[in-house]
Image (tube, helix red, strand yellow):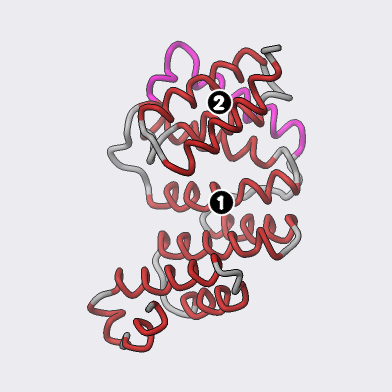
């Protein structure tokens, strides 16, 4: 039915019903992805990218492309694509961050979380710059490929998300950021802090349930964080 809808869509729909037209093509790309028609999914995304898209629209298209690349390409190629797009969004990260960069990001994040300021992370956002939202939208699906390219990249991602949430409140739920911080900061940082954020992530899964993401977070915390502390 998505194919029929695309055949019936007109050029004027992009002017009069832009949101519906964009969703139609994104859902079509997702449908092709779910049925392992990866070339067809990429072709639909290519057609979308020929249009004049806004910042958040470009981020949504990029998320679908990253999902396909993560399954069909080498993790480094997928990471390079995500990092190149992040540069367009004003965020410049190397493919292989130095240890100094990781430590400095962890120190800055921990300094900003000091003195009970962590409570700010648990406040819903009342407004966040569009550039920040686009970066966060892009970083979440890139995490798997980035972690396989260089385990230091996800550390930068979760530190950035927590600092954004500290300044403007969280988007959706802070559970994912807490989970990432507990997982990827564990080899670098205070183990008790990892346990603390792992527990916080599970608490937020209960507060804001999510059918798929909640189960994944529970699996990650129980399988990858708790074994460090429990028999």
Q: Secondary structure at mark 2?
A: helix
Front residue of this view, candidates 48 and 71? 71
Q: Which residue is mark 1?
A: 141
Front residue of this view, candidates 63 and 114? 63
Q: Earlier in the sequence, mark 1 or mark 2?
A: 2
Residue 61 placed where, x, y %? 48, 65
Circle 1 or circle 2, nearest the eye: 1
Q: Secondary structure at mark 1?
A: helix
Q: Which residue is mark 2?
A: 109
Residue segment shown in magenta: 98-120
Image quarter of residue 86: bottom right
Q: Is residue 83 above or below residue 188?
A: below
Q: Is residue 130 above or below residue 81?
A: above
**Residue in view at x 73 percent, y 24 percent:** 187
Q: Residues within 10 Å of mark 2 (few under 14, many from 20)?
A: some
Residue 18 placement, left or right of 185: left
Query: Quadrant location of the C terminus?
Result: top right
**Residue in view at x 52 percent, y 29 percent:** 178
The main secondary structure of the magenta stretch is helix
Front residue of this view, candidates 5 and 200? 5
Residue 218 placed where, x, y %? 54, 30
**Residue in view at x 62 percent, y 46 percent:** 143
Q: Is residue 5 magenta?
A: no
Residue 224 placement, left or right of 137: right
Residue 29 placed where, x, y %? 49, 71
């Amino acid at each position: 039915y998505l194919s029929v809808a695309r055949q019936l869509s007109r050029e004027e729909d992009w002017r009069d019903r832009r949101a519906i037209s964009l969703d139609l093509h994104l859902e079509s790309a997702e449908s092709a992805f779910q049925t392992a028609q990866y070339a067809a999914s990429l072709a639909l995304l290519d057609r979308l990218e020929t249009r004049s898209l806004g910042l958040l629209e470009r981020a949504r298209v990029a998320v679908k492309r990253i999902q396909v690349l993560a399954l069909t390409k080498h993790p480094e190629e997928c990471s390079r694509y995500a990092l190149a797009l992040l540069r367009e969004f004003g965020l410049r990260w190397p493919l292989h961050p130095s240890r100094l960069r990781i430590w400095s990001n962890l120190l800055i994040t921990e300094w900003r979380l000091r003195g009970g300021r962590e409570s700010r992370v648990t406040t819903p956002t009342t407004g966040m710059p569009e550039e920040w939202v686009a970066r966060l939208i892009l970083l979440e699906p890139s995490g798997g490929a980035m972690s396989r390219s260089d385990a230091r990249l996800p550390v930068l991602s979760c530190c950035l998300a927590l600092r954004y949430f500290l300044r403007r409140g969280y988007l959706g739920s802070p559970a994912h950021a807490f989970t990432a911080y507990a997982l990827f900061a564990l080899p670098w940082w205070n183990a008790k802090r990892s346990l603390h954020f792992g527990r916080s992530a599970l608490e937020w899964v209960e507060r804001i349930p999510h059918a798929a993401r909640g189960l994944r977070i529970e699996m990650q915390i129980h399988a990858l964080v708790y074994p460090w502390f429990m028999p």
